[in-house]
Image (spheres, rainbow, N blue to C red):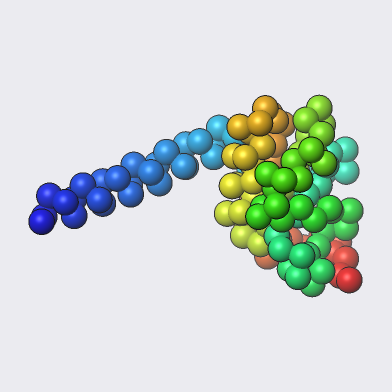
């Protein structure tokens, strides 16, 4: 019994470590200042759900929710940098991994997500 619990815990820890390492390889986290310097020359994508996006988003961002990323990936050019953000940084990390697996290499995300954003915002 104790061995099976240890095995499950070990598997969970290994999986978390694997996800952390693969996310580090796929995406470069940027501070708000770094994000602002580059996002106007890139594809700015909000990966939150439409209701979150409509409640307020970074000016100029397109909404492609992480839940629709696989179906809508053709809307994102692979020859231009991709700047992603979500509410806290978790979903943009998952979106970055999906893009990385499909050959995208210039992927950045906003450290801390939209909740830390103090720049220009647009609401619908």
- Residue 78 x %, y %: 78, 30
Question: From this viewpoint, is residue 121 visible?
Answer: yes
Q: Residue 30, located in which quarter of the rendered image?
A: top right
Q: Residue 79, located in which quarter of the rendered image?
A: top right
Of the pair 34 and 13, the residue shown nearer to us = 13
Question: For the view shown, which residue lies furthest in the front direction?
Answer: 71
- Residue 8 x %, y %: 25, 51
Q: In which quarter of the image is the N terminus?
A: bottom left
Question: From this viewpoint, is residue 33 visible?
Answer: no
In this rendering, position of residue 42 left or right of residue 48:
right
Up the image or down, 101 lies above or below 108; here it is above
The total number of labels drawn is 0
Q: Quadrant of the C terminus?
A: bottom right
Of the pair 51 and 23, the residue shown nearer to us = 51
Q: Residue at x 78, y 34 (%)?
A: 81
Q: Which residue is drawn at 16% across and 51% down?
A: 4
- Residue 15 x %, y %: 38, 43
Up the image or down, 116 lies above or below 62; here it is below
Q: Which residue is drawn at 85% across and 64% down?
A: 121
- Residue 96 x %, y %: 64, 41
Of the pair 91 and 74, the residue shown nearer to us = 74
Q: Residue at x 59, y 47 (%)?
A: 94
Of the pair 113 and 68, the residue shown nearer to us = 68
Q: Residue 38, located in which quarter of the rendered image?
A: top right
In this rendering, position of residue 120 left or right of residue 101:
right
């Amino acid at each position: 019994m104790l061995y099976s619990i240890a095995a499950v815990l070990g598997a969970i820890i290994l999986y978390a470590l694997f996800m952390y390492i693969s996310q580090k390889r796929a995406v470069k986290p940027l501070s708000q200042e770094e994000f602002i310097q580059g996002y106007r020359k890139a594809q700015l994508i909000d990966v939150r759900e439409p209701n979150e996006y409509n409640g307020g988003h970074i000016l100029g961002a397109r909404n492609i929710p992480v839940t629709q990323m696989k179906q809508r990936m053709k809307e994102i050019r692979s020859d231009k940098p991709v700047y992603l953000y979500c509410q806290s940084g978790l979903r943009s990390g998952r979106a970055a991994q999906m893009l990385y697996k499909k050959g995208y290499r210039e992927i950045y995300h906003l450290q801390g997500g939209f909740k830390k954003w103090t720049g220009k915002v647009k609401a619908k």
